[in-house]
């Protein structure tokens, strides 16, 4: 069984995440919780210190314990995949989001599990392989501090990644530059992507894994990554806590009519 201070901290964290305590609200005084039977003074104090360590509250003399204002993480669009970030540096996609949001990060906040699995219908369609084929699954859970933000599972054809760092289960990105750098070094330079998003009700295991408050939906992402010749080198499925991200896209507005004219060339008089 969890110690009493941990149970109290988890209960208060659920109330914060559900909005029962909103940003700027003051949590009850320690003495009030002691009088309400929530435990001894040291139990409540330890619970509050845990909430502070998890980034949910701030404590100061004269102001008590206050729910921390929490801006949503920016989930960048194409900018998070800028080759200069991962090919020439070490700013993998989830780190690019943190940097753009002005938030701290640790590489170890991404865990991963590597396994050979049979391709489901969705994965088979995404990778362009027969259903039931063996493919590598690289499942990651990403946290900000102690709070999970999303999961992302990338699927690869074995011939593309066998023997590379992408099948190494060490926590954190797959070495300097992450997975895209590994593919680049193996001769598979990514060129373009297709992303599909939709919101849905989370499954019970997702509620537990992402520590979702009651009623919070998730945003599911399907990402297909191609080389310049159209080879699919990754198909990924991500599940994001809906209230923890603000999806941000910056792009040039297309003009297909002008593009068609340029491709056809000047018309003869």
Image (cartoon, grey):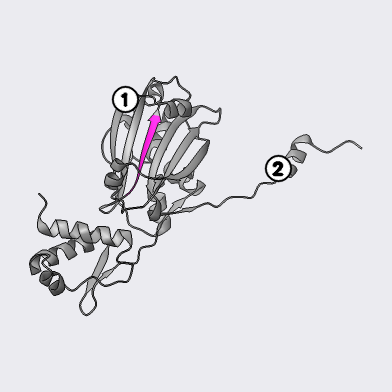
Give the left or right position of residue 62, taking residue 110 as reference. Answer: left
Q: Which residue is tagged 1?
A: 116
Give the left or right position of residue 266, taking residue 85 as reference. Answer: right
Q: Residue at x 39, y 26 (%)?
A: 120
Provide residue 186's location: percent of width, then percent of height.
Answer: 42, 28
Among the 4 quarters of the image, the one containing residue 58 = bottom left
- Classify mark 2: residues with Cα within 10 Å, few (<14), some (14-19) or many (20+): few
| Residue 91 shows in the view | no
Q: Residue at x 20, y 77 (%)?
A: 61
Q: Quick check: 261 above or below 36? A: above
Q: Nearer the viewer, residue 173 or 148?
A: 148
Q: Which residue is tagged 2?
A: 256
Provide residue 255's location: percent of width, then percent of height.
Answer: 70, 46
Q: Quick check: 189 above or below 38? A: above
Q: Residue at x 31, y 59 (%)?
A: 17
Query: In this view, which residue lies farthest toward the right?
Result: 269
Provide residue 118's location: percent of width, then percent of height.
Answer: 35, 23
Q: Quick check: 99 above or below 33? A: above
Classify mark 1: helix, strand or loop.
strand
Is residue 61 magenta-colored? no
Disc 1 to disc 2: CB gap under 8 Å: no
| Residue 203 shows in the view | yes
Q: Nearer the viewer, residue 256 or 89?
A: 256
Among the 4 quarters of the image, the one containing residue 3 = bottom left
Classify mark 2: helix, strand or loop.
helix
Among the 4 quarters of the image, the one containing residue 30 = bottom left
Nearer-N-terminus badge (1/2):
1
Q: CA distance from mark 1 to mark 2?
A: 42 Å
Q: Which residues are magenta?
A: 149-155
Q: Quick check: 147 above or below 51? A: above
């Amino acid at each position: 069984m969890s110690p009493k201070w941990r149970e109290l901290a988890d209960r208060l964290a659920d109330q914060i995440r559900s909005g029962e305590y909103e940003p700027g609200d003051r949590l009850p005084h320690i003495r009030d919780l002691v009088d309400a039977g929530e435990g001894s003074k040291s139990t409540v104090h330890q619970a509050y210190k845990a909430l502070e360590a998890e980034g949910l509250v701030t404590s100061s003399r004269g102001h008590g314990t206050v729910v921390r204002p929490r801006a949503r993480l920016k989930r960048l669009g194409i900018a998070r995949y800028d080759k200069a970030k991962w090919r020439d540096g070490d700013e993998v996609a989830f780190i690019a989001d943190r940097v753009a949001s002005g938030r701290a990060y640790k590489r170890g906040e991404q865990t991963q599990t590597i396994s050979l699995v049979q391709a489901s219908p969705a994965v088979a369609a995404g990778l362009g392989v027969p259903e039931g084929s063996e493919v590598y699954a690289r499942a990651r859970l990403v946290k900000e501090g102690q709070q999970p933000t999303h999961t992302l599972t990338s699927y690869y054809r074995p011939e593309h990644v066998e023997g590379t760092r992408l099948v190494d289960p060490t926590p954190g990105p797959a070495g300097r530059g992450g997975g895209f750098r590994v593919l680049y070094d193996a001769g598979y330079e990514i060129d373009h992507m297709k992303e599909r998003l939709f919101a849905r009700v989370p499954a019970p295991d997702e509620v537990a894994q992402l520590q979702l408050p009651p009623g919070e939906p998730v945003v599911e992402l399907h990402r297909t990554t191609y080389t310049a010749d159209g080879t699919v080198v990754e198909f990924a499925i991500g599940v994001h806590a809906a209230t923890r991200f603000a999806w941000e896209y910056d792009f040039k507005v297309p003009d297909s009519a002008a593009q068609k004219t340029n491709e056809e060339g000047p018309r003869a008089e």
